Image: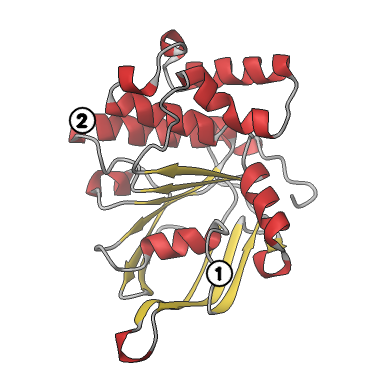
Amino acid sequence: MAEGIDPGAAGASGEVLTGDPMVRVEGLRRSYGTGEHAVHALRGVGLTVGRGELVALKGRSGSGKTTLLNLIGGLDTPDAGSVSVDGVDLAGLGERGLLRLRRDRIGFVFQSFGLIPILTAAENVGVPLRIREADPREREERVALLLSLVGLDGHAAQRPGELSGGQQQRVAIARALANRPALLIADEPTGQLDAETGMVVMNLIRAVVRSEGVTALVATHDAQWLGLADRVLELNDGEVVEDHGPR
């Protein structure tokens, strides 16, 4: 993390932090397949995301949203261009470096929840802390705090199959925040939820972004998201075609 940046500062005031951006993308290109059958998912995308910003990515299916998030999260490699997260150029990291970045600096929330069925809500939230070999007391305190933050402190002992879809997504959000990431990446986090539950989850993500001082990138088809974001980026055919809100 860049010196002089307090990752919790945005949480206290709700203001977007200034200084070096959390995410910088330049000339990003990614294609799948070859020849006439190639799919050009991204075509020279460039953007920045400031520290403490909540940015929504909108666009129809196939516009490049998921590809962009996967590249920013270090889950895929671009054909051309560069990605830096928290001042770190991803191209300069080997697989171990990318693994550490994803483990320590980035939290992921997916449409499919991705919870481990045999573990309780508390155990699911604690998985990243176990991987990091955090002190057991620290782990228990952090898990309890996060479950309280997402409104599930009374459901700690329940397994995913005993929870509603909205509750499962709240557990997934708590798990994504376990290691105090600088960046939260959410790909269609309300895609499996009804409209009312989806709005609850969207407001929750905005609240935890503020309270935890996290930067967030959220891809969505849901128009309700757009009013909650600091900025809205629209992708179409692999290019950013609209950028609404302060840079």
Q: In front: mark 2 or mark 1?
A: 1
Q: Is residue 2 left or right of residue 155?
A: right
Q: x and y percent of residue 171 in the render?
A: 44, 26
Residue at 34%, 32% (x, y): give it. 201
In the figure, residue 161 lies in which quadrant?
Answer: top left
SS type, badge 2: helix
| Closer to the camera in the image, 123 or 177 | 123
What residue appears at the point 73 percent right and 29 percent down from the top-left corner?
133
The numbered mark, 2 or 1, whose residue comes first in the sequence reads 1
**Residue at figure coordinates x 44%, y 42% from the top left:** 109
Residue at image location 23% in from the left, 49% down from the top: 223
Question: What color scheme is it?
Answer: secondary structure
Q: Amino acid at mark 1?
A: Thr
Q: Please say whether residue 204 is visible from this viewpoint.
A: yes
* Residue 154 drawn above or below residue 219: above
Task: Check whether the beta carbons of the residues at disc 2 and disc 1 lie within 8 A of each other.
Answer: no
Left or right of residue 5, residue 55 in this image: left
For the residues marked 2 and 1, what is the alpha-carbon distance in whole angstroms? 36 Å
- Position in image of residue 144 (x %, y %): 56, 15
* Residue under pointer 2: 196
Q: Would residue 247 be seen by someone viewing this image from the given angle?
A: no
27 w.r.t. 87: above or below: below
38 shown above or below 45: below
Q: Which mark is residue 20?
A: none
- 76 lies left or right of 181: left
**How many numbered marks, from 0 up?**
2
Residue at which label 1 appears: 77
Q: Classify 10 Å Cα crowding around label 1: few (below 14), some (14-19), many (20 and above).
A: some
Q: Secondary structure at mark 1?
A: loop
